[in-house]
Image (spheres, coloured by chain):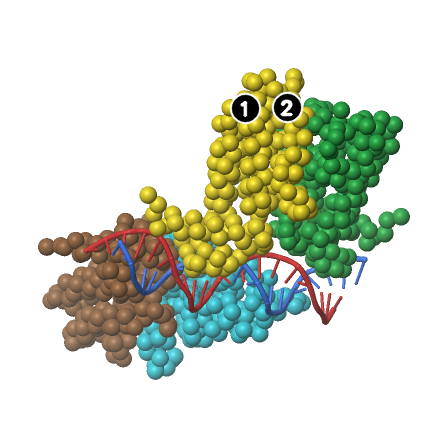
Chain colours: A yellow, B green, C brown, D cyan, E blue, F red
Amino acid sequence: MTSRADRTKQRLFEATLKLASSRGLVGLTVDEIAAEAGVAKGTVYYNFGSKDGLIEALLRYGVGQLAGRLRAHTGKPDPVAGLESLVDEGLAFVAEYRGFSQILVSEMWRTPGQWHETLTPLREEIVSIVKDQLQRVSDAGRLPEGVLIPTAAAGLFGTLLVVALDWQVFQPQRARAEVRDGVLLLLRGFTR
Amino acid sequence: MTSRADRTKQRLFEATLKLASSRGLVGLTVDEIAAEAGVAKGTVYYNFGSKDGLIEALLRYGVGQLAGRLRAHTGKPDPVAGLESLVDEGLAFVAEYRGFSQILVSEMWRTPGQWHETLTPLREEIVSIVKDQLQRVSDAGRLPEGVLIPTAAAGLFGTLLVVALDWQVFQPQRARAEVRDGVLLLLRGFTR
Amino acid sequence: MTSRADRTKQRLFEATLKLASSRGLVGLTVDEIAAEAGVAKGTVYYNFGSKDGLIEALLRYGVGQLAGRLRAHTGKPDPVAGLESLVDEGLAFVAEYRGFSQILVSEMWRTPGQWHETLTPLREEIVSIVKDQLQRVSDAGRLPEGVLIPTAAAGLFGTLLVVALDWQVFQPQRARAEVRDGVLLLLRGFTR
Amino acid sequence: MTSRADRTKQRLFEATLKLASSRGLVGLTVDEIAAEAGVAKGTVYYNFGSKDGLIEALLRYGVGQLAGRLRAHTGKPDPVAGLESLVDEGLAFVAEYRGFSQILVSEMWRTPGQWHETLTPLREEIVSIVKDQLQRVSDAGRLPEGVLIPTAAAGLFGTLLVVALDWQVFQPQRARAEVRDGVLLLLRGFTR
DNA sequence: AATGAATGAGGTTTCATTCAT
DNA sequence: GATGAATGAAACCTCATTCAT
C-alpha cells in the first residue's frame, strides 16, 4: 500500500530525475523541482527536510531502480548472453536517466565528498550484481585464467557508466546497439 | 623566469585542485580558493577575470600536462607496447593528480555544464592521442576487424580514468602494476 | 471531571512551558510543541485555533494560578506581614514555575509584541492585588509620605519577578528565606 | 583609527538599535536593518556572518555603551549622590534604547537560552559597576548592617531594568525624575 | 599587482495555517 | 476529537562580482 506521502515522494523523484537529465542535478532549484512535480516548495521540505535530503533519497531510489533493471537480466541460461544483456540494460538506463548517471559519475569517486558515504554501499550493490554474473560466466568456463572477478566487476561498472555517458554526450548519433557492441568488444578481453 | 603573477596563479591552481577534489567545482567558492591560496579574493579576479576564467585556465593547464605525458609514450616501435605504456602513464597521472582527475570525470559529461564547452576540445586532444596510437596498432594489423578507432579511443580514455579512480578510492591496496595488467586484459578485446 | 480535550490541553500547556523556558515564546514552533506533548500538529489547531490561541490560554492559565496564590496571603490582620507573606509566595511561585516566569519577563514589556495585548490586563490583575495590599498598609499609616501606590505596586511586581529569577539562575545556592529577607530589606524603603 | 568596516558595523548597530526600539529585536528582518543602515543586505552577512552574529555583537556593543554611561557617574564625592546619579543614567539609557533593554530582560534569565552565555559575563560587568558604587556607599558608613553588597547589586540592576521598562511601556506619561524618585525610595531600604 | 569591503540576485529554509481523512 | 500531509509567504543566507584604495 502506498501512502499519500509515498506518492508525493515518488512524484518528486520523477520530477527531479526528469529535470536532472536536461539541466544537471547541481544547479537545479527546489522551486523548479516542486513546480515540475506539481507540489508546493514546502512539500519538498516536509518530505525530505532539505534539498540535500532529497538528493540523498534520490540517489538511493535511482540506484535501486538501476539495480532492479540489471537484476532482471541475470537469469538467462547462457551467462555470456546474460552479461551482454546486462550491459545493454545499463546503457538503456543511462540513456533514460542521463542526469542521474552523470551525478553518479561525479560523486562516486569524490573523497571525502558530500554523498560519498551514501554512494559507497550503493555502488557495492551494483558491483555485486555484475560480480555475480561474472561468476556465472566463470563457472561456465568462459572467463580466461587470471581474471580477478571483483576487480573486473568494479571496472566493468565504471566503464559502462562512462562509455554510456560519452555516447550520450559526444556521440548521440550512434545507435545503442553499436555502443553495446563496442563495450562487448572490450568484454572480449574478459570473456571468450 | 616566473613572475610574481605567475607564482600567484600557480598557488591558485594548487588551492583549487586541493579543494575541488572533495567539494567539486560547482560547490567551490572563490572565497575558499583565495583563502586556501593565501591571497585576497580580488586577486583571483585580477589574475583570471572570473571564477570561470580560473577554472578554465586550470583545466587547460591540467589537460596540457596529461597530454604531454601521454604523448611521450607514443613513439615506441611496437605500437601495442606503446599503447600499454600509454595506459600505464595514464594510471600514474591519475594517481599523482587525483584531484584533477576527479574534476575531469565530474565535469566531462555534465551537460549543459558550466565548463563543458571548455572541456570538449580538451577531451578531443587526449582522445586524439589515443586515437593516433590505436591507428598505429591498426596499421600494424593488430586490431580485429570491425573496431571503430574513434569510438574505441573515446571508450579507452573514459575507462582508463574511471578504473584508475576506482583503484585509488576503493582499492588503494592494489599495486599499480596489478591495475595496469587488469586494464591491459581489457585491451585484449581490442588488440591481438 | 476532566474530559479528553482537557487532558490534551493540559499536556499542550506543559509542553509549551517546558520548551518556552529555553527557547522563548517567539522561537517556539507549533511542531515542537505538538511533538513534546505527543500529539499531532493539527490537534493544537483543533483545541486552540492558532498558536496565539494556545499561548494566550497558557498566559491566562498561568497568571490565574499566580493571582490565586497571591490573593491567599492578602487577608492577614497585619498588613505589613501580609505584604511580606505575599512577597514570599511570589518567590515560591517563580521557583516552582520558572519557565512561566521567564515567559512573563520576556513578554511583559515587549512592544508591539504578539502577546502584549493579552498580557496587559493580566499584569493589571496581579498589580491590583499588590496595590490593594499596599493600600491596606497605607490605611494602617505604615507607608511613608509621598509614596504613589499604583507606581509602587507596579515596581514591586517587576522587582519581585526579576529578583526571583536572578536568584534561580545566578545564585541558586541561596536559600529562599535569604532572598526573601533581601527583598524585604528593599521593602523597608516603603514601609515603616 | 576606525576602518571602513568598523564604521559600517557602527551604522548597523545604530540602525538595529533604532528599529529594535519600536519593533522589538525579534521579528526584525535583516532586510529592514540593512535598509535602515543604508547598506545592502549582504553587508550584514559580510560583517557579522549571520543575523544571530549581528545580535550577539549588538549585545556586547549595547552593554558596553550602558557600562560606559554608568561608569561616568561613579566618580562623585558623595557616594549616595553617585548611586542616585547612576540610577538616573540607567533610566535614561532604557528610555533611549528601549528595544535593546527589552531583549536584555528577555534573555538575561533564559536558560539555556541562545544568548545566555554571551550575556552572563556582560551582566557581570554591569553588576560590578553597581557593586563598586555600593561598596563606596558602605565605606562611607551609609549602608545598614546586614546588607550583602553582591546580592544588593544584582537585585538593583534587575530592578532598575524592569522598573524602567515598566515606566516606558505602561506609564509613559510619568516624568523620568518621578520614576527615579520611586526607585530611590526603594533604595532607602539599603541606604540611609 | 593586490586588496577586501560592499553588493544584490537568486537560492534555501522555516513555520503558522489549512483541510481531507 | 484528532491527524498529518500539504501549503506558500516571508524570512535567512550564499557567493560571483565590482571597485575604491
Q: Residue at the location (76% across, 45% down)?
A: B124
- Quarter occupied by residue C132: bottom left
- Label 1 crowd bin: few (<14), some (14–19), many (20+), radius 10 Å: few
- Quarter occupied by residue A145: top right
Q: Residue at the location (72% across, 25% down)?
A: B188
Residue receiving disc 2:
A191
- In which chain is the residue bearing label 1? A
**Amino acid type of the residue tagged 2 in the rendering:** Thr
| Discs 2/1, front | 1
Name the side, left or right, on which C182 lies relative to B152: left
Q: Position of residue D64 (x, y in %)?
A: 51, 65
Q: Position of residue D3 (x, y in %)?
A: 66, 66
Q: From where the camera sits, is residue C49 visible?
A: yes
Q: Callout 2: helix, strand or loop?
A: loop
In the image, residue D99 above or below residue A110 = below
Name the side, left or right, on which D109 lies relative to B154: left
- Cα separation, mark 2 vs mark 1, equals 13 Å
Name the side, left or right, on which B53 lies relative to C115: right
In this view, the residue in front, A49 or A182, is: A182
Q: Callout 1: helix, strand or loop?
A: loop
In the image, residue D93 above or below residue B119 = below
In the image, residue D76 above or below residue C47 = below
Q: Badges 2 and 1: C-beta atoms under 8 Å apart?
A: no
Q: Which mark is residue D121?
A: none
In this view, the residue in front, A143 or A151, is: A143
Q: Which mark is residue A78?
A: 1
Q: Position of residue D33 (x, y in %)?
A: 51, 70
Q: From where the camera sits, is residue D122 visible?
A: no
**Amino acid type of the residue tagged 1 in the rendering:** Asp
In this view, the residue in front, B73 or C107, is: B73
